[in-house]
Each structure stands twice: as structure tokens, then as C-alpha cells.
Image (cartoon, coloured by chain):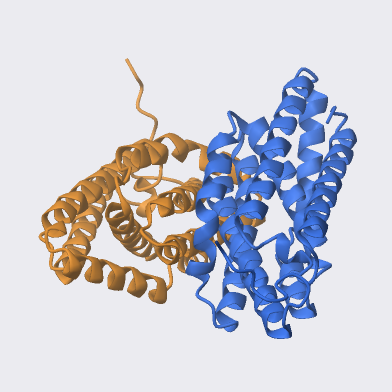
Chain colours: A orange, B blue
Amino acid sequence: MSIPSPGSDDAISAGELSARYDKFVVDLLGGIAYGELSAFEHLSSDARHSPTLQDRAVLGKMAVAEFGHFEMVCARLSAMGMDPELAMLPFQLIVDAFHARTRPADWHESLMKAYVVDAITEDFYARIAEHLDADTRAVIAQARTGEEQSALLVGLLQKMLAEDPRLSSRLALWGRRLVGEALTQVQRIGAKHSFLVGLRPDGTQEEAAAEVHAILTALTRGHSKRMSQLGLTA
Amino acid sequence: MSIPSPGSDDAISAGELSARYDKFVVDLLGGIAYGELSAFEHLSSDARHSPTLQDRAVLGKMAVAEFGHFEMVCARLSAMGMDPELAMLPFQLIVDAFHARTRPADWHESLMKAYVVDAITEDFYARIAEHLDADTRAVIAQARTGEEQSALLVGLLQKMLAEDPRLSSRLALWGRRLVGEALTQVQRIGAKHSFLVGLRPDGTQEEAAAEVHAILTALTRGHSKRMSQLGLTA
């Protein structure tokens, strides 16, 4: 029989709240750092599918930007006195599994993955950043992909779909798979780490669950909007 | 029966010499650009073998630098009024075949490949640059890997060999395979393209062949010296 600790739910000390918040930020930055490092590695490998050498450089450029974000987030973790490696480790299996399950079969799928996953990741960061201190928010803002890069991807995807309309149904399906895997990953990370629970450090489990639900809904909505812009069914 | 063109060997016009030189420079830059782009893609994928996330970032950083070189050489080709894509195309099969034949089996081999291939490539550029105009020489100099990066690789390799002396014979063998493949590639490129022949635009075929031989000897000597520094038999 377990003895309930006194006031465990309704009287959390300020010190414990602060520790929980710090743990949350380290988890978040660790997750972002590992996500950026893997994105770098996968984008640069996926680039090899490109039909032309010029296209190959498009994903390469994006990969290089992700590596810059990785270095920047690691620097922030180090400045906080944390070991970036330790902060990243808990996310390695989940992120690797995501990439293993979403291996693009060709250039079209590589481009689509770069666009869909990047956008949904950014939406996720932006949503979470609302709850954070100004310094952490600034780091996360810097880790966002530039507008120019996103516009370039959209342009390439639109051109590709216009040139070969038969691609639409395949890429719509691929988009659904990608978003499904991405949201599953968000849920798994949330369940396994202090990550999403930390969003409302003074809130109850129910409030945290509601917040997670709200995030997933917002991410899905953003994704659907982007697919419509490409003329695809989300 | 072919009619010999008048003075074909001993009276090449200044215009033809200049055209031959330009073709040589475009070939050279195209080869360097494609080499850097592939190095970027391979280093970033090979990085996944790394034992720690920190080590993984070492090759990643090197890959990012190679991508910068690729962009810089492409910019130079564009400034010369050349299409970088067209300039790179002739080197795609040879370089891809090189990487296919030298796929590292683990982190040790990845690190060794990064070091050996990068150094020999730089020696090759440096040797060829002697024959070139100042502008082209400057571009090639900028495409060289920094001292800091090379020193980092040597440090990691030395640490690795000190920790596990059994690695020595395997890595010595791997080094020999890498240098063999690299020199074969240099020869194939030389035979197939105007590349090495252009080294002495006013020279005879015999002089060009002697120059190629001298380059291969110098590259082998540089490689042996680097292996000795690691305590390995070249």
C-alpha cells in the first residue's frame, strides 16, 4: 500500500516548480538539438535522389541550415551548464524510429518530407515557445527555418505537381503518413518525458492532457492548410 | 585516311591554347564542385556511425564546410559564365563509383576516410594550382579544409589508435585501399577529361604524362607521411 505524500498535488513548492521548469527546458532543447542533427543527416542523404545536381543542392542547403541550428541549441545547453549529449540522448531512439518509418522512396517524397516535417516541427516549437521565458524563446526562434527556404520548397513542390498531376494522389497519401508519424512522435515524446507535462508546471495532469490535445489539433490544422495550398487532400 | 592538319603539334594558335586552358579550368572546378558536394553527402551520412553524439557532430561540421566550398566553386563557375551543373556532370559517375567502393564499415573507417581522402584531394588541388592563374588559384585555396579541422581529425584518430592498438592493422589496410582508389580515380579522370593534359597546354603528350606521374608520386609520398604520423604502415 502506498502512502500518499502530503499535498503532492495541490501544494508544489516554488523550488520544485522551478526545477520542473528547468528540466522541461533542457528536455525541449535536447529534443530540438537531436531533431536538427538528424534532419541534417537525413536531408543531406535524401538529397541524393534529386533529378538534377541543382536540386540536390536545395536540400543540401536546408541540411546545412539545420546543422547551424543544432550547433546553436547545443551552445545554449552548454551555457546552461548542461551536457548537450546527455540532453539529446533520451530522444535518439524516438527520432531515429521516425526517420526509419518515413524513408522517402524518391525525390518527390524527399521534398515533400522536408516540407511537411519541417513545417510541423516549427509549428510545434512555436506553440510550445509561448509558455517559455524570453531567452529560451529567442533560441527556439533562431532555430526556425527561414521563410525563403520554405518558399523555395513550396515553389519546387508546386512545379513538380503541375508537371505531373498523377503525383497528387501519391503525395497526398505520403503527406498523411508523414503527419501521422509526426503526431505519433509528439505524443510518444510527451508521454515519455517531462516535456509536454511541463507546459503548465502548476497545472494538473488533466490540464496538461488538454493542452497536448490542443497542440495536436493545431498541428493537424496547420498541416491541412499547407496541403490545400499545394492542391492536395490532407 | 585522315589528312594531318597543318602544324597540329608544334604550332598551336594562341586562341586554341587559351580555349584549352579555359576548358581545363572549367573541368577542374567542375570536378572539385562535384567532389565537395559528394563529400558533403557522404560525410554527413557516415557521421551516423559515430559512437557518441559529440563525435557525430565532428564529421557533420566537416560536411558543412564542404558544402560551403561547393557553393563557392559553383559561384565561381557561374561568374565565368558556365553552368555549374554541366561542369559537374562529367565527374558524377567516377566520384560516385569511388564512394561506392569505399563505403566505411564503422566509425573508425569513416574517420580514417575523411582524413585520408580529404588530405590527398587537397594535395592534388595544391599541386595543380601551381599551374593556374591567380584568380583560379584563390578559389581553390578557399576550398581547402581548415588546419583546425585536420588537426581535430588527427587528434581523434590518434586517440582511437591509442585506445585500441588492434585497430592499427585494420586501419593501415583501409588506408591503403583508400589511397589506391583515390589514385585510380585521379588517373581515370586524367585519362577521360582534358583535365590533367591541360596542365601544360603548350607541352607534348609525353610531358603531360610525365607530369601526371610526378603528381601521383607526390600524392603517394604525402599519404605515406601522414600514415607514419599515425604510426601506421602506408
Is any atom of residue B118 visible in this view? yes
At x 63% / y 48%, what residue is drawn?
B188
| Left or right: residue B219 compared with residue B58 | right
| Left or right: residue A156 compared with residue A39 | left
Q: Position of residue A89 (x, y in %)?
A: 52, 37
Q: Tell which of B166 and A195 is nearer to you.
A: B166
Q: Tell which of A36 and A103 is nearer to you.
A: A103
Toward the front, the furthest residue is B1
At x 80% / y 47%, what residue is drawn?
B216
In this rendering, is residue B16 above or below B162? below
Number of numbered discs visible in the structure rendering: 0
Q: Position of residue A103 (x, y in %)?
A: 33, 42
| Left or right: residue B76 compared with residue A116 | right
Q: Position of residue B160 (x, y in %)?
A: 76, 30
At x 16% / y 57%, what residue is drawn?
A167
Q: Position of residue B76 (x, y in %)?
A: 62, 77
In this rendering, is residue A80 above or below A102? below
Q: Quadrant of residue A124?
A: bottom left
Where, quadrant-wise, is the N terminus of chain A in this rendering?
top left
Where, quadrant-wise, is the C terminus of chain A in this rendering?
bottom left
Is any atom of residue A80 visible in this view? no
Toward the top, the furthest residue is A1
At x 60% / y 54%, what residue is drawn?
B192
Q: Tell which of A67 and B186 is nearer to you.
A: B186
